Image (spheres, rainbow, N blue to C red):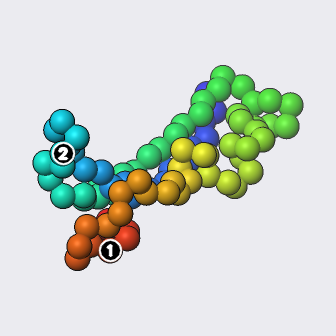
Amino acid sequence: MFEVAYETTFCATHVLTDAGRPIEPVHGHDWRVEVVAAGESLDRLGVVVSGGCASGRPPAAARPMPSRHPPSPGMSATPC
C-alpha cells in the first residue's frame, strides 16, 4: 500500500441566523484538513497521484475564498 498526504489549515468566519436575523456576532474558527490518497501500486511514473494533486498547488478547496461577511466592529478582517 502506498500513501501520499496533503495537510493545510485555514480560517473560516460565519454567523448563525434565525429567520434571517443574526443570533450571534460574526466569528471565526481555525480548521485543519488532511487529504490522503492511497493506492495498491504506483503508476508508470512511480507515484500514487499525479497532475494537479502533485504540482505543489493546494487543492481548490484549500485556497482562500472571499468573505461574504464584513468584519464586525472591533474585529479584524481576518478574525482567526
Mark 1 falls on what kind of element? Answer: loop
On screen, residue 33 above or below 25: above
Q: Mark 1 Cα within 10 Å, few/some/many (few <14, many 20+)?
A: few
Q: Nearer the viewer, residue 29 or 26?
A: 26
Image disc number at residue 12: none
**The residue under label 2 is which amino acid type?**
Arg
On screen, residue 40 above or below 78: above
Spatial CA distance of label 2 from label 1 is 22 Å
* Residue drawn 53% across the image and 50% down it: 62
The quadrant in which the N terminus is found is top right
Reading the image, the residue beneath label 2 is 21
Q: Nearer the viewer, residue 48 or 19?
A: 19
Estimate the x, y position of residue 45 in percent, counting from the top left.
85, 37
Precedes in sequence: disc 2 or disc 1: 2
Estimate the x, y position of residue 46 in percent, counting from the top left.
80, 37
Estimate the x, y position of residue 76 in percent, counting from the top left.
32, 74
The quadrant in which the C terminus is found is bottom left
Estimate the x, y position of residue 55 in percent, counting from the top left.
74, 51
Mark 2 falls on what kind of element? Answer: strand
Please state if 36 lies on the left or on the right of 48 as rendered.
left
Count of marks placed on residues = 2
Q: Nearer the viewer, residue 29 or 33?
A: 29
**The residue under label 1 is which amino acid type?**
Ser
On screen, residue 74 above or below 6: below
Reading the image, the residue beneath label 1 is 76
